[in-house]
Image (cartoon, rainbow, N blue to C red):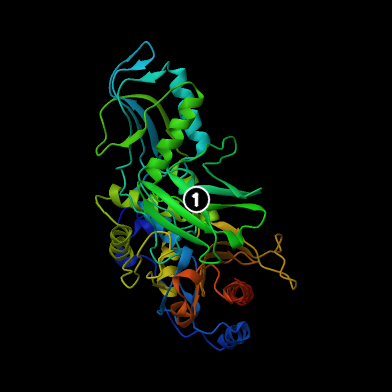
Amino acid sequence: MACLLAGAADRAFGLPLSHSPRPELRPAGPVASGADALIEAARLGGKIGFVVADARTGAVLEARNPILRLPPASTAKAVTTLYALAKLPPDYRFQTRVLATGPVRGGRVEGDLVLAGTGDPVLDTDTLAGLAAGLKAAGVREVAGKFRYFAGALPHLKVIDPEQPDHVSYNPAVSGLNLNFNRVLFEWHRASAGWDVTMDARSNSYRPRVGMSRMRVVNRQSPIYTYDDRAGTDDWTVASAVLGNGGSRWLPVRKPALYAAEVFQTLARSHGIVLPAPVAAPALPQGAVIVAHDSPVLRELLTDMLKYSTNMTAEVIGMTATYAGGGHPVSLSGSAAAMNDWLGETLGIRRARFVDHSGLGSGSRIAAADMVKLLVAAGADGPLRPLMKPVWLRDAKGRPVKDHPVRIRAKTGTLNFASALTGYVTTADGRELAFATFMADEERRAKLDRASRERPKGGRSWATRARTLQLKLIERWATLYGA
């Protein structure tokens, strides 16, 4: 295999698969009792699996349940990152274009105007405003035909994970035309009779009102929110009992392409360009590009995805990578299956199962040994590590110690009663370690109903204890296994 990952220069990727470095599991030795004491003190219940290995040789230094498959949560985004770098060039950009299907004469488009996306996961209202300004600068004032939008570069998926509550913004729709991470801002203020409510596509500079997502206040105690797909709109209700005097909350958008088109229509109007009501284009119309916007390069998108753990970005990039590799998925599970195949074909990791690219879906599973195998293959000096965010060890009061001699680059992951942390550690004396920790109380997870999954009772304290345990394990490993 000439190169497993685009841009990777580590010697591991110049070797055939039969010689690629892989962790060699062996007994952890007498020091394992120290880890047992930390685990007992954390009082997590459920199951725990971890592996720590030399990041350069793959030699396993310590392990607990190394082949037990547990939920990766958002550490799945580390796998998606390597998958994307293998399938797409590191300078890949998503492009959003405004096309005219006919000539522009005297400021009039003699044909249709088309807003066409390729899936840009970070397109926002400010960017759309720039496109609208560019349209004006090109001399366009009106359109003789229709205003169309095209989002067919990726399939339209109404949600990432259907098991999540309707109203959580980390579970939006995904399509080939996205805006503001496919979220709309719901804001309310107490009025003389009830509440004034607005739904807008807010950004740093703009706050255009939105009509395709609507909110009604209903006199009830619960449920807090309800959602319905009604007459082409996202139709929400909210319980009056929870509103108080005012506030705001991001809600997911289920029709992102229409959302983007409607906001663009509003922004164009602010420049004196009157567009007809937007209609979907079933196929990409042929036309001349009037104005276009390129996203940041792939490596920047991946860095932000890992830092902020944005689920929509992971799904867009993962599906785009699958398409680039020749696949034609119509679902997240289909694209994730292509990533599973890639893991098996390139590294012999055949036990892992991902159902999406973000880790939000509860069906994904991977063993700590397999995740560490992937990290070792990527290399201590490879493409993944610099994209990961720094994680700091804590002092006795739980405060991050940013000048600690032990340096960590890692990806966190949190679901209800499931926590993961995986990445690289540089010990105080310079030894490089790769590690993966997975913790889950799947019995407690299974008992949660859909309505309680946003803030389950005991979930926050469990997650805090899990993260504390992970950092204590890393501190211990850095002390024991320094060069």
Residue in front for this viewpoint, 227 or 3? 227
Residue 401 picture quarter = bottom right
Percent position of residue 316, x then y: 39, 50
Instruction: Give, as a three-letter code, the residue at label 1.
Output: Met
Please state if 483 lies on the left or on the right of 65 as rendered: right
Using residue 136 as the reference point, say whether residue 455 is left or right of it.
Answer: right
Residue under the image location 51 percent in, 37 percent down: 125
Residue 256 in the figure: left or right of residue 454 = left
The quarter of the picture where the C terminus appears is: bottom right
Image location of residue 187, percent across then percent down: 58, 48
User: In the image, residue 410 lies at what x, y percent?
Assistant: 54, 62
354 or 32: nearer the viewer: 354
Residue 176 horizontal side relative to residue 388, left or right: left
- At 49% across and 30% down in the image, what residue appears? 267
Residue at the spot x=46%, y=27% of the render?
268
Return the residue at label 1.
Answer: 215
Name the residue rendered at 46%, 36% in the picture.
263
Q: Residues within 10 Å of mark 1 (few under 14, many from 20)?
A: some
- Tag count in the figure? 1
